[in-house]
Amino acid sequence: MSTDIPDVSGLSIGILGGTGDQGKGLARRFALAGHSVLIGSRSAERAQEAAESVGATVSGADNSTVAAEADVVIVAIPWEGHRSTLESLRAELSGKIVVDCVNPLGFDKQGAFALQVEEGSAAQQAAEVLPDSRVVAAFHHVSAVLLLDPEVKEIDLDVLVLGDDREATDTVQALAGRIPGVRGVYGGRLRNAHQIEGLTANLISINRRYKAHAGLRVTDI
């Protein structure tokens, strides 16, 4: 792989829906890598509590403040509130790289399954709702358990990064690489994000069968 990746060490990172395990886990790892991290929630108080539980250079505020202040914004909100939350933040997210890691999944007695999304994927829905933002799909398959575990120093994982803006995908690949053990890999255009989001259901099945926290590695690059 090319090592010609941008220097992203000075970027601040906002995480919408950062009070969940995935959001807190990403916040923790980016803070450990030296980034200023802002956790967002509908409730500023809940966001501050989550930030305190993570520690390091993490602060909390309401989603609107986080969207306005962060250089790069990661969307880690529940699928049910995806469209409405992003619609309410359209102005604050204008011109920014917005990284969508939402997996539209359903669950029944047979396990997890991918939901049909009218726009094709959560990431494509984000791009439709945020026409003035640079939407990238990434961080779908990172185990929250591993992100939060202080005993895990490196995470053995490739993060697939999809988008239509080369500078934006390069930036997100570089951000992925800030987490020890992780590599950011370009995975195609945003129109193919539905496959990446849906694959999470397969990983959940793998994890249940093998009692694991499975990730992906791409060979020969």
Image (cartoon, rainbow, N blue to C red):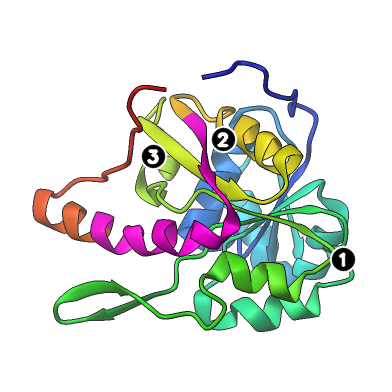
Residue type at mark 1: give it. Answer: Glu
Q: Is residue 19 visible?
A: yes
Which secondary structure lies at badge 2?
helix
Q: Mark 1 highlights which residue?
A: 92
Q: Nearer the viewer, residue 211 or 103?
A: 103
Q: Earlier in the sequence, mark 2 or mark 3?
A: 3
Q: Earlier in the sequence, mark 3 or mark 1?
A: 1
Is 153 located above or below residue 216 in the figure?
above
Q: Nearer the viewer, residue 28 or 215?
A: 215
Q: Is residue 42 visible?
A: no
Please give the count of numbered marks on the rendered protein.
Answer: 3
Give residue 149's mark: 3
Residue type at mark 2: give it. Answer: Ala
Number of other residues with Cα within 10 Å of mark 3, as a class: few under 14, some 14 to 19, many 20 or more: few
Q: Mark 2 highlights which residue?
A: 176
CA gap, disc 2 to disc 3?
18 Å
Which secondary structure lies at badge 3?
loop
